[in-house]
Amino acid sequence: ELLASRGEAEAEADRSLYCFVCGQTVTSLGQRIPVQGSFEHTCTNPGGYVYTIGCFREAEGCDEAGELAEAFSWFPGYSWRYAFCASCRVHLGWVYESTTEAPERFFGLILNRLVAGRDSFPSTS
């Protein structure tokens, strides 16, 4: 029974998360990490837009754009730049970097822009 639950936990951790627009693999559940005490954060930008983001160690399906900015960072001690889907270029969140905090780097991805399955996409290739 212990082996079965360990296998289920490993399968859950390996489960991929995909771009909600094109179905490109972005990251996996196993890449989730707590930052400043939590995996999930609800944040409001200066324009009043509210985002619920999750923190991920890596997001191989993201490209980064822009200069690192300190202004309006939702994580004290971190600078940020944009993270886009490497395939369709839709904005998926931000990548954060710090020279004084741990982790030194992580992705803050907008959770409702990630999907756990590719069922709604025409192709899985």
Image: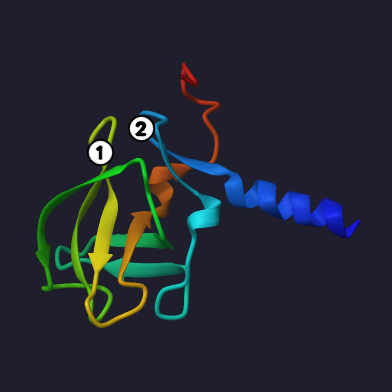
Where, quadrant-wise, is the N terminus in this rendering?
bottom right
Q: Position of residue 24 (x, y in %)?
A: 39, 32
Give amino acid for label 1. Val
Q: Position of residue 90 (x, y in %)?
A: 25, 38
Q: Name the residue under label 1.
A: 90
Residue appearing at x 12%, y 73% in the figure: 70
Q: In this view, does 107 lie above or below 124?
A: below
Residue appearing at x 24%, y 60% in the figure: 49
Residue appearing at x 26%, y 65% in the figure: 96
Q: Do the residues labelled 1 and 2 touch (CB within 8 Å)?
A: yes
Q: How crowded is mark 2: few (under 14 residues within 10 Å), some or many (20 or more)?
A: some
Q: Is residue 76 above or below residue 125?
A: below
Q: Where is residue 5 in the image (x, y as percent from the top left)?
A: 81, 55
Q: Name the residue under label 2.
A: 21
Residue appearing at x 11%, y 73% in the figure: 71
- Taking the image as shown, residue 52 lies to the left or right of residue 64, namely right
